[in-house]
Structures are given as structure tokens and as C-alpha cells.
Image (cartoon, rainbow, N blue to C red):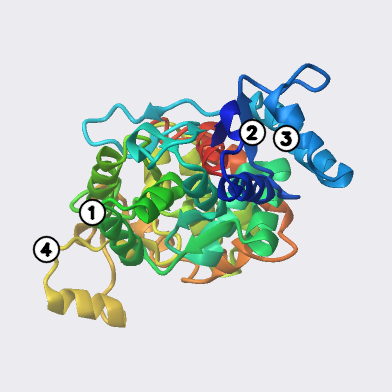
Amino acid sequence: MRLVLDRALFAPQSGREAGELLRLFTAAIDDVAPHAVQTDPPYVLGADNQEIDAWLAGRHAEEAGALQAVLAQGNVLASGARGAASVDPAPLPSWRLAGGFDVRVERRAASDWGALQLTLADAIDLLREPVHLLLENEFNDLAFVCHLAGPTLGPVLRRLHAASGRLHVHGGGGGQAKTWLEALIEPPLTAAKWRRALRAWVLFDQDSGDPDARDPSRTAVDMMTLCERVHAAFPAGLTWSCLRRREIESYVPDAGLHAEATATHGAMVQQIVDWRRDPALAPLAWAFDLKLGLRGDLRSSLPQATREAVKRKTLALDATMLKVPFDALGPAEVAALDSGLGKSRLNDALKADPPSGWTSDIPAEYDRGPAHQAPRLALIQSLFDRI
């Protein structure tokens, strides 16, 4: 997000306006990830900047230097990386990246949020609004996003979350994210809702479809539909993505699976690694439940008595009990993939501090596919576009 200030604001017409202009610059200063603030036309150090120079001249030297640095830095930040709007071409998109956007700040009676033309007061509130990360799990999913961002940008996200308060993570499952988004589009669309929408970034799991485990779950499809409704309500759009593998654990690289597996899971891990290497079979690896194994994909039409017997392990699991595509597996494969690594093993490994060495391979693992997921670099840039 970039703020573009009308130069007329640097000739304040009241004490209140003068105070608001100064507060906006103060809000723009951040040691971790400063805000991009420009003027229209842009401020050029050493040139005749008229109203801006006169405004700076009226300040103490130290304060004027800090304010001038914000303007100079704003030009640098504005010329940096910026995401373009893009969307999954599927009839129901599984991701939409709104791209970078400009907010114009000018002297006006009231803000026009739809046109992103704001008063000084509303612009200050927007700068102070934290980025809202809507994730399914505050700690595991945030750790995954930081790993996905790589060695340069990942630490920036960690510092923003830990130190500056600029990153507010909403965890607690898809239900909490759904409630948060539904409240956003409940009329009327207030200034507070606009601020939250412009600062929101949503990421959720595909989970497992029925009857085909390779498809998104009903819950994930409902979230996609809701995200598109929010996008339609706010012209600047909502940035959101549904992961096209089953869950974040599905992006643990081969080395991570081998490192975290116990001796009893060696055959299971090797099967997943082998599937990943074969383009025709990789979708099975991406859909597999690494936490529960094949027991996480019993078909919904299975009689409850049979389901309970399988759960108690008084009845052996076989392929006829499973969703597509696992219903085509042979007896040896079903036996090897019967159970997973447990609900917490990979989650704990993802959020370990210091991180395991294999976490540096997560970006490359994401890039292996599937092809229709949000491109990784664009996805991470879309988060920084919100910051």
C-alpha cells in the first residue's frame, strides 16, 4: 500500500490539519517495515519543493530531518516490488491476489473509500490499522508463511509480528475466519470495515473433498465463495488463497518427512516421496493425510458400525472403505499408509525455534505444485502489498 499526499496539505488551513499532517508522518515511521508515503508530484531532495520545503523549514532541525527522510524513503519504497492483481482462472477461483494499491490523501469533507481518496484523519487510522492475517492456526500457519517467504522476507514477518504489532494473526480454525469475514460485509460498510478489508490477507487449507480426496472440502469451497463476496464488496479487493495441497503439512519437504518420521513410518514416508517424484501420482501425495494416514479419508457412505470398528482397529482397513483415489490402492500400499505421523508432530517441527534445517526447502517444495495454486512469489508479495 502506498499513500500519495496532495501537496496542498503542506500549507495547512488550520491547527487541526497541521497536527494531523504531523501525526500521519509519525505513524509512517517503522524500523522494521516503514510505510511508503509519497507526495503528488513526488518530493525530490534538493529541488524546489515549494509548500513542502516551507513546511519543513518551520520545524526543528532534527524533526525536519526525520520528516524529510520519510519523504525520501517513500520514493524508494514506491519504486520497489509491487504485486499485480491476479486470480485463479477457474470458474470458482481458489485464490485471488488484489495487488498493490495507492491511497490518495487530500483535503476533503469526507473520505471516499470506494475511490481510495481519504481525509488526513482516515489515512492516519489506516496506517495504524494492523495487517490482519486470517489463518487456521496462529502459530503453525504463521511459521509456515514465514518459511514460505524465504530467508530474507521471513524474518521481516517474524519481527513485524513479535515486535511492532503491525501483524495481527487471527487463528482458531476456519470458523473464526468465516465469522470475521462475514462481519466485514454486514451493512453498513463503515470506515473501520474498509480499513480491515484493505489490511486483510487470508490463507486456508484445501482439506479433503468427498467423494474425491483431491478436491477441496465443502468447508473450503464455502470459504472461497465467501472470500469472493468480500472481494466484490470492496473495490480494492481482498487478497486470499486456498492452499491446493491438503494442508500446510503437505508442504513439508522430503527431507523433513524423513527427519520427523519414526521407524514405524518409514514405508509411509517413502511412498509419499515416491509419489511426489512422479507427475502422474503427485496428486495422491498432495491429498494424503500426513497426520492420520488413510484413516483420515474414509468415505462418507461407510456405515457407522464399520467406521467405529476401523477406529477401534478391530476391523482391518481396506481400499473399499476409502475415498477416491485411495480406493484404487493395493493391500500392501494400504498397510503402509494406514496411519500417519500424528496430529502434532509436523506442526511442532514447523514452528520449532530455532527451525530445523529442512525448513529452508519449503519454498522449493511449494514450487513443485500443483500448477493451479497461487504462485509462491506473487503470494508472498501480496502479503507485503497489504503491509
Question: Which is nearer the N-term, disc 2 or disc 1?
Answer: 2
Q: Which mark is residue 358?
A: none
Judged from the image, the secondary structure of the residue bearing numbered disc 4 is loop
Q: Residue at x 77, y 36 (%)?
A: 56
Q: Nearer the viewer, mark 4 or mark 3?
A: 3
- Cα–Cα gap, marks 2 and 4: 68 Å
Q: Residue at x 26, y 30 (%)?
A: 90
The C terminus, quarter of image? top right
| Along the viewing direction, whichever of 264 and 244 lies nearer the viewer | 244
Q: Mark 1 sits on what residue? A: 188
Which residue type carries mark 2?
Answer: Phe
Question: What is the residue that sits farthest to the right in this orientation?
Answer: 61
Q: Mark 4 sits on what residue? A: 301
- Cα–Cα gap, marks 1 and 3: 38 Å
Residues at circles 2 and 3 in contact by the CB criterion of under 8 Å:
yes
Q: Mark 2 sits on what residue? A: 10
Q: Nearer the viewer, mark 2 or mark 4?
A: 2
Q: Residue at x 88, y 42 (%)?
A: 61
Q: Is residue 177 above or below residue 367?
A: below
Which residue type carries mark 4?
Answer: Ser
